[in-house]
Image (tube, rainbow, N blue to C red):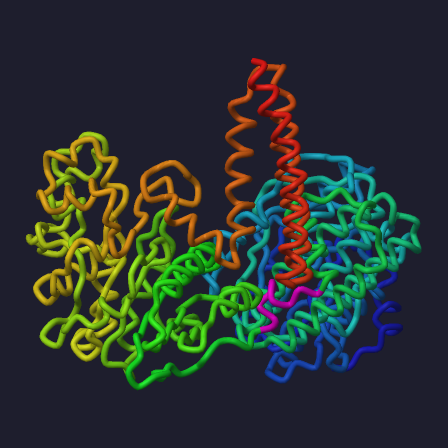
Amino acid sequence: MNVKIQDVIKKRVSKMIKISVIIPVYNVEQYLPKCLDSVLNQTLKDIEIICINDESPDNCAQILEEYQKRDSRIIILNQKNSGQGSARNRGLEIAKGKYIQFLDSDDFYEPTCCEEMYNLMEQHKDIDVACFDCNIIYDAYEEHQKYDNDYFRMKYMGKKRNIPAMAHQLVDVNCWNKIFRKSFLDKYKIYFPEKLHYEDVGFFWFWITKVSYIYFYQKKLTNYLRRKGSFLGEIYEKKSKTIFDAFAVNELIYKDLCKSNKWNEYKTAFIRSYLMKIRWLIECFPIDARKEKRRLINLCASFLSQFDLLDFQLSEEEFNLYNNVINKNYYIFGAYTKYDVKNILPMFEDGINIVFCTDKNYISYLSVALQSIIENSSPINNYDIVIVHDGIYDFQKRYILSQRQSNISIRFFNIQDYIAEFNLNNLFTRSDMSIAAYYRLFLGKIFFNYKKILYLDCDLIVTTDIADLFAVDINNYTLAACLDTHIANNMVAIDSDIPRLANFKKYMEQTFNYTNSERYFNSGVLLINIDMFNSLSVDHLLHLANINKSYYHDQNVLNAAFSHEFLELSPKWNVQTHIKYYPKYRLQLPVDVIQIYDDYDEMPYILHYTSQPKVWADLYKQWNNVWWQYARKSPYYEILMQSLCKTSHKSIVTNTQVAGMSIVRNVANYSKNRFDYYRCKLLSKITLGKLRKHYKKKRKELKSKLKQVRKFLKGK
C-alpha cells in the first residue's frame, strides 16, 4: 500500500498522540510480527506506529498490511531502498507524537516501555532525551558478549547535565533505547545521515551536542537482538563498505560541530572517539585486506592532518595512535605485509632447519637468539630459519631480515590463517606465556615437506655451531630434547619456595595418566622427526591441550604425547639458567649437572633463560652478560635498552621516597621521555643508520645526566 506523506498527515491531525514509534523495515519477516505485537500491546494506547518499508525483498509488505487492517494505529510508508537513515527521517517527517521512540524491526519492547518513558518525560519538562536499559538476545556473535555488556552498561543514573565527555564512550550511540522530545528534534533540525551505514552515530552526535539534560532510567524496557545480517553483523563480517561509511559519517559530524559553534567544546571528545573508531574498525578488515587498510589509513590521515595535536587532551596510547595514522605507518596496522611465505619448502638440500615461534612481544628477544646462531655459524653450512608468528609488524620483520647472511635464510610464516579452523580460545595461558606457545603443536603439519627441524625458544642463546645439534641422529625417535632440570630432578616435590609445584606429579598423573616425571623434558629446544611427529593428529594434541589447565602450556602436552618416544640430549644443549639460583639445587641435581652450572670456564652450548625475572630485565646474574653481548650486536639493541630503561625508571620512581632525591627522578623521567620520543621516530622512519646516530647522541646526553646522579649519590 503506497501512502503519500501529505495524505497520512491529514488523516491524523485531529488525534492526540503521545508517542510516535518509528520502525524501519527491511528483510525481517522472521522477526517483524513479534516486533509489531510488542508495540501494539503497550499499556500506553495513545501511540502511533510508523512503519517504513524500505523496499524489503521478502514478505514484510504483506505482514505490515495485515497488521494495519487489525489496528489503525499502524501507518505504512513505502520507499525505494535507501537505508535505515532515510527510513527514520521519513518517519520523523510525518510523526505527530509529542515524543519520539525508534525501534528496529527485529527487536521488541517490554509491555510498559512507552508508558513508563512517557510518564518520566512528563515529570521532567526540562529533559529532552531519556535513555533506558535493554536486554541483549544472542542469535549470533555470542563471543562479543563481554564487549556488549560493557558498551551498553549505563554509566549514570537519574537526571544529569550534559558534558562533552558523555559523547565519548559514556553514552551509547543507539537511538532505539531512548525517547526524544519531538519539539527538541524539530528546533535543531536533527536528522539521520542518509544512504550511509553508521547513521546512528551521526544522529547521536547531532543531538548530544545540543541537549542540556539527559535522564538515565536504569530499567530494561527493550530487547535487542544480536544477529547475522544486522548492521553490527556486517561490521563483524568485515564488509568494507560498512567500515568506510563510518568515516564518511564522521565528516558530517565535524561539519555540524563547526556549524553549530560546538567544535572547541567537543573537539577532544570527538578526536578521542575518532581514534577509538580507527583502532576498532581496522581490526574488522580481513587479515589479507591490506589495500583496503591502507586506503582507510590514508583517509584518516588526510582528515587528522588538518588539526594541531596540541589542541587535544589525549592519553599516551591515543597520542601514539594519532602519530601512527598521521605518519601512515601501515605496518603498525598490518596494512603492509610482503615478507610472509604461504607454503614452506626447504631452502637448501642439506640445510640446518631451524624454527622459532613468536608474537609481537618476543620478537626483539628472538633477534638476540638469531644473532647468537649467526655468530657461531659455520660458512660451510646452510641455515634455513623460519619464524612462525601470529601477526608481527613488517618493520619488525625488516629488522630481523637485516641479520641475513649469504648462507643464512630467514623467512616468516603467519600461522593465523592456518589455525583459523581450530578453536584455541579455551587453552590454558598465563600472563608470562601467551597462546603462541601452542604453535609448536602445529609444526609437524606446517613443515610436512621437511624430514627434520630444530625448534628453539626465543629466550635463549647459542654459544656453538647449532649444526652440531642438528646432526644428532633421531631416525628412531619422534623428538630429541633435554630433561627439564627442575622437574626431572624432583625439585617440584619438596621446594617450599614454590608451593604450587608440589602437586605437579599428582596433577600430571590425574590429567594425562603421566607417571614418568623423571623423564620430563623441556620443550624450549626440540629436534623433531617430522614423519613420526605427524603420526599423532593435531586434533589429538589439541585435545590434550584442552584438558591441561595448570602448570606448563604445550610442554605438558608434548610430554604426555611423546614421553616414551624422545631421545635424551646432553644437558649442555639446554641449560636452564634459573636453576642456578634455586636454594636447594645442590642437594638434588646429579653431579654432572652441578658441574655444568658451577663451571665458569666452559660455556654451555645453549643458555636458556627460563623463569622470571628474564635476562632483559636483570643484568647481574651469571650468564646474563653473555646474552647482552649478543644483544649489543642485534638490530634491536636500542629497543631493548628502551625496555630496560623503562623498567629502571619504574624502579627508581617507586623506590625514591626522599625529597632530596628529586634529581634521580628527573633523570629517570628524562630517560623515559627521550626513549618515548625516539620510539615515535622509529615507527615513522625506519632507517637504521640514522636511528643509531640519533641514539648515540642521546646516549651522550643521558651519560651527562647520570654523572649528576653519581655525584649526588657520592655526596649522600
| Residue 276 figure quarter | bottom right
Exactly how many numbered labels are in the figure?
Answer: 0
**Residue at point 15% right, 64% down?**
561
Taking the magenta stretch, the answer to whether it contains residue 94 is no
From this viewpoint, is residue 114 visible? no
Q: Position of residue 538 (x, y in %)?
A: 25, 72
Instruction: State the quadrant of the C terminus.
Output: top right
| Highlighted range, magenta | 328-336
| Residue 577 figure quarter | top left
From this viewpoint, is residue 181 visible? yes
Q: Position of residue 108 (x, y in %)?
A: 58, 60
The one of 651 and 560 positioned closer to us in this rendering: 651
Image position of 285 with respect to 327: above or below: below
| Residue 652 figure quarter | top right
Taking the magenta stretch, the answer to whether it contains residue 334 is yes
**Residue at point 8% right, 64% down?**
564
Give the side of residue 591 with respect to residue 63, left or right.
Answer: left
Q: Position of residue 669 (x, y in %)?
A: 64, 33
Q: Position of residue 548 (x, y in %)?
A: 23, 54
The one of 28 and 332 positioned closer to us in this rendering: 332
The one of 413 and 576 positioned closer to us in this rendering: 576
